Amino acid sequence: MKSLFPRRAGSPAQRRIAAVALLAGLIAPLAACGGLTANDNDKSSVSETYTDLRTGKPESARDKAVLDALPESVRSTYAGFWHATRVGPNPYADWKPSQAPWKFCYSSAYQGNSWRQEGLAVAKDIVAQLDKKGLVDGPLIVSDANNNASLQATQLTTMVQKGCDVILVMQPPTVGLCKAFDAAQKAGALVVVMQTGTDCTNVVQSDFGAYDAGRTSAEWLVDKVGNTKDTIVMCDGIPGVAAAEARQAGASDTFKKAGLKVDHITGQWTPSTIKSQMLRYLSTHQGAIAGVWDGGVCAVPVTQAFQQADRDLPPVTGFEGACSWLASWKQTGSESFGFAGGAGQGVNEAFKVALRMLAGQKPKHNTLLYPLVQIDGSNVDKYYKPGMKLSSGCNAQPANGGSVPAAYYDDLFTGTGTPATFDAGLADLPVK
């Protein structure tokens, strides 16, 4: 069958050291003028090669064709992918990894919360394990852009100049860094974007299927409420953010299919805002509420709002598996549903992808999506730990050490190189 993703023309990548030297000469005048811009007016690849990022839009014929061509084993996880990311050919098809030891770098858009700090802690632990095997060249290089895209672009450039072989990028902005990513790729560095969608097609993306997760949690709620005339309230995230919109699209499509009435509050992924929005909604809607769907960090403040308003607590889903959500579940005794979606598992999956590529395997596509581990009444006791409180800032991690087994990626890669392995160590993360 003819590929839906024709490979781009171009010569194989130059050896990393020579490319870095060349890039440094090109970057110097840019740095003197304040660094690389984060503005990406020019697309890094032709749009017809990759699907379009179409957040909040219905499935197109192109989207359907790409989805249908994916291996059946992963197809459900890729459902609704266009809300959060683009899918196309492997931008590293001609890339040849250097020999170990490798220099690993970690570029974070923001490190100012416990979720991000957890991800970095896991990355440092994995690098330390690989170092003991003689596979690492120096300590993990880390940067924090404090939500400044221009600063992050400059930091990425610095990482390339320092000779980073692998750059793991935690939740960068959807747009704004494509030029910096392109420079890194041309220098021979492998760039893996983690835990978010991206409009850039010159990186490899590792993320969970956001639409699929939103759909799955909504299906649990539909099963709980049955054929009701009462209202489902969707607690949405930040408008326009691809990750939020993808989750919401999955849930909305599910509730629409079930014929349920739906209202919305916009919590902006901020607990205080969520609680005030829910209290305002409850004060103006005295009718029965069938359930509340959580698009992220909503479960605890929503529960607190119902308690403060002295209203019966309906089924409320969780999402990312916050320790505070598990504590609330135990406190109220009201069954819920969510995922083991801490940052640690996301970093774990990104390293699996990078190590496969360093071993010579090649991903079939630029975007590698996986399903999150589900938490429900049948397994909650595996995830709840004494010491979890409503004020806890930790997150549940997959009980088996990873969101998916290593074999999950077999249908998404070609090649037979044996990747280095590591102990995820997620169960050892502190409860705090």
Image: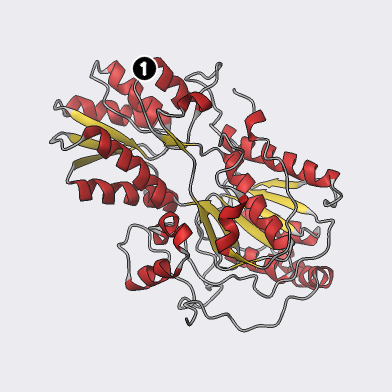
Q: Quadrant of residue 205?
A: bottom right
Q: Quadrant of residue 346?
A: top right
How would you rate the neighbour count of disc 1 (Cα within 10 Å): few for under 14, some for 14-19, many for 20 or more?
few
The one nearer the camera, 385 or 161, is 385
Q: Is residue 78 left or right of residue 275?
A: right
The one nearer the camera, 94 or 372, is 372
Q: Residue at x 52, y 73 (%)?
A: 43
**Count of number-bearing discs:** 1
Q: Is residue 43 above or below residue 38?
A: below
Residue 160 placement (x, y as % from top left): 75, 61
Q: Is residue 48 left or right of residue 140?
A: left
The one nearer the camera, 203 or 100, is 100
User: Is any part of residue 154 visible from this angle?
Assistant: no
Q: Residue at x 64, y 64 (%)?
A: 180
What sort of colour scheme is used for the picture?
A: secondary structure
Q: Quadrant of residue 201?
A: bottom right
Say which element carries label 1: helix
Residue 133 placement (x, y as % from top left): 84, 47
- Please name the amino acid that badge 1 sits on: Thr
The one nearer the camera, 181 or 323, is 323
Q: Is residue 53 left or right of residue 358?
A: left
User: Is any part of residue 411 visible from this angle?
Assistant: yes
Q: Residue at x 23, y 19 (%)?
A: 311
- The residue that label 1 is drawn on is 332
Question: Where does the C terminus fall, quadrant-wise?
Answer: top right
Q: Is residue 180 left or right of residue 209?
A: right
Q: Is residue 18 above or below residue 311?
A: below
Q: Residue at x 39, y 58 (%)?
A: 79
Residue 120 placement (x, y as % from top left): 67, 40
Residue 19 placement (x, y as % from top left): 79, 72
